[in-house]
Amino acid sequence: MHHLCSFNYIGLVDAIDPALRRSGRFDAEIEVTVPTEEERFEILKLYAKKIPLEANVDLQAIAASCNGYVGADLEALCREATMSAVKRSSDADECASVFCVTMEDWKHARSVAGPSITRGVTVEIPKVSWEDIGGLRDLKGILVLAATNRPHAIDAALLRPGRFDLVLYVPSPDLEARYEILCVHTINMKVGDDVDLRGIAEDTELFTGAELEGLCRKAGIVALRENISATVVCNHHFQTVKDALKPALTKEEVNSYSSYMKTRSLTTSGQSESNAIANRDTKSKKNLLVPVLSVTTCVVSVAFLAAAKYFSMHTNQTRHELATT
């Protein structure tokens, strides 16, 4: 053997010792990328060749929804879909050897066999048009919404015209809003006759919608911990949770948010007035500049005429002296 060729592969490129990448060692590096949508479709066709598929199974759509799946993942996907179909047939007292893989089986398989590549790769950009986005078919521009609970940390450049033009302050829910939120989150919960949702709403000032939702959910958990067969959530369950929860917001923060909006409004109006004053000053300067220019032009013209007359008289006198001589 005159030459020795060594091949190695690794999934953690950053873990390679730099000494192995020097000349004379592993000279060539070949990157095997994640399969594209078309490549995933071809792999699925190969593995699903011997699998009985229902007529409505769309392998192209399955391939499109499997971003990040490598060949081994797609093989596992086909295997899990087949096992799901076999189990469904056996549960239905049908012959295990006679089954058909449906789209539901593929959906179940995706929940079991996930992609191996989830980080450190370039995300495949799907082909999406405006027609594919509900409600935005006639939209020609892009609408950007952003939310923050730290308004003082926003860069002032983001609030200039043409960027985030409109700033909306969403305060914490008031009494009526808290009551409505509690009603929504207890609509599927059987509560006792002693539960006063309006009273709970009055006692939960500064609670956000998420905190009220957590209050209802934890009240149900407390009821189950008290009695695993409980079917009703009583008032003392809500009170137990409420006493243990504290709102994330404070009155100081709410006042800070309100003052920020007021300050910003004053700043915006102040900037508008400053711009108006600056425009008026500019116009006044322009109006003052016109007579100044006129006077300057007049003085320069008089000086030029005087100089021309002096030069003419001096020239005539010189000629007369030359003629006499």
Image (tube, helix red, strand yellow):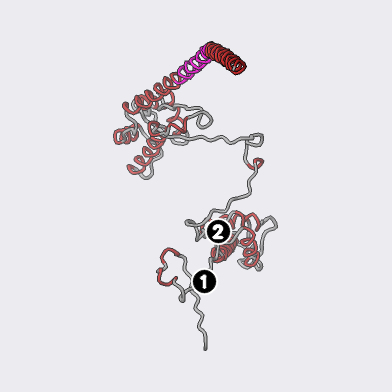
Q: Residue furthest left?
A: 243
In the depicted structure, whether residue 67 falls above or below residue 238? below
Q: Does the magenta run of residues contain 291?
A: yes
Q: Is residue 157 left or right of residue 59?
A: left
Quarter holding residue 179: top left
Quarter of the image that includes the C terminus: top right
Quarter holding residue 40: bottom right
Q: Is residue 319 left or right of residue 149?
A: right
Q: Label 2 belongs to which residue? A: 109
* Residue at left offset 52%, top offset 59%: 115
Q: Residue furthest front?
A: 325
Q: Does the magenta run of residues contain 176?
A: no
Judged by depth in the image, the label closer to the viewer, 2 or 1, is 1
Q: Label 1 belongs to which residue? A: 28
Start and end of the magenta stretch? 271-292
* Residue at left offset 38%, top offset 44%: 229
| Gap in angstroms between the C-alphas marked 2 and 1 | 38 Å
- Tell me the element at label 2: helix
- Tell me the element at label 1: loop
In the depicted structure, whether residue 224 falls above or below residue 93? above
Q: Percent from the top left, x then y, of residue 244?
A: 29, 36
Q: Residue furthest bottom?
A: 1
Q: Percent from the top left, x then y, of residue 239?
A: 32, 32
Q: Amino acid at mark 2?
A: Ala
Residue nearest the observer in this picture, 42 or 190: 42
In the depicted structure, whether residue 95 falls above or below residue 215? below
* Residue at left offset 55%, top offset 66%: 32
Q: Percent from the top left, x then y, of residue 61?
A: 64, 54
Q: Amino acid at mark 1?
A: Ala
